[in-house]
Image: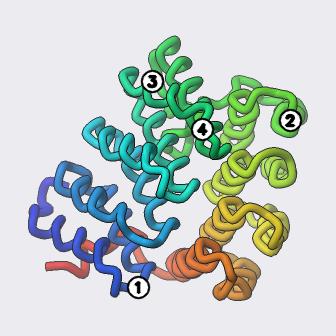
Amino acid sequence: MSSITEDQVKAIGGVLNDPNRPLKERFRALFTLRNVGGATAQECIKQCFKDPSALLKHELAYCLGQMQDHAAIPTLVSVLRDKSQEAMVRHEAGEALGALGAPDICAILEEFKNDPVVEVAETCALALDRLSWVEKHREDGRSENPYQSVDPTPPSEEKDVSKLRTVLLDENESLFNRYRAMFALRNLRSSDAVLALTDGLKAGSALFKHEVAFVLGQLQDPVSVPALLESLSDKTENEMVRHECAEALGAIATEECNSGLEKHLHDEKRVVSESCVIALDMCEYENSPEFQYANTLLSVK
């Protein structure tokens, strides 16, 4: 990325921070900045946390965690502390802090592991468990991860789908171990493993089910489409879960996904309707000859 000039990065940031741009363009700009990295890209992302879209702000925090630059810590701590931010945004800031793996942020995570917002509390407790595991094992778990994402927990060493499913669905088991089972099932990438994961969409907290949906989006296996559509269509389900189901459907991008997403374009929950907009753009990308989704660099001078 060394051939990209600072002016180009700022121009991409201008797309991200322009509320008059279509949301799908702003998302593509965000992921372009994530891929570019560096101080200027981070600054452009940081400026966007005042946006009214919870979906966009949650994605900002996710990208800062995945960029693996400790310079993002003050921004993420500020977002986590900001009680005016939506639960899904604060949760993602806590998860990003855990993804960065810096021991010096344990104090802030301890402070919020009993937050009254359950999604925030669970996220910070998980992040503390992850940091403890990383410290003991001196690795972040990506070596066994075919998706190269920085996950909230390492995968379990267990390879038996039936045993992993049992742990995944056991609501008396620790959230850390259930997540470990989840990522182990993802890494197996078999149809049986995917179907076991779909059962997780009905078992546990909103945080847990939203992570299951995220993992199903990474897998992009059409066998999960009926379960994802069912959760997206459930108006009693938490909007965090429904939003992640929409984005997973966008990643899978079959005709069935496309038609299901169109039905919820005008959902009364803003984060769900916006997720369907983004997911339909992903569907279009997955079914096009475009080389990459994060392509804003091609349209800026």
Q: Which residue is mark 1?
A: 22
Q: Which quadrant does the C terminus fall into?
A: bottom left
Q: Earlier in the sequence, mark 2 or mark 3?
A: 3
Within 10 Å of disc 1 (Cα), the crowding (few <14, some 14-19, many 20+) is few
Q: Which residue is mark 3?
A: 106
Q: Is residue 87 above or below residue 289?
A: above
Q: Which residue is mark 4?
A: 115
Residue 293 lies, in percent from the top left, at: 42, 70
Instruction: Identify the amino acid type marked 1.
Output: Pro
Q: Earlier in the sequence, mark 1 or mark 4?
A: 1
Which is closer to the viewer, label 2 or label 3? 3
Q: Earlier in the sequence, mark 4 or mark 3?
A: 3
Measure how far apart labels 4 and 3 are at the Cα level. 15 Å
Residue 126 lies, in percent from the top left, at: 61, 31
Residue in the foreground of this view, choosing between 71 and 153: 71
Measure how far apart labels 1 and 3 are at the Cα level. 38 Å
Instruction: Identify the amino acid type marked 2.
Output: Glu
Within 10 Å of disc 3 (Cα), the crowding (few <14, some 14-19, many 20+) is some
Measure how far apart labels 1 and 4 are at the Cα level. 34 Å
User: Which secondary structure lies at badge 1?
Assistant: loop
Measure how far apart labels 2 and 3 are at the Cα level. 26 Å
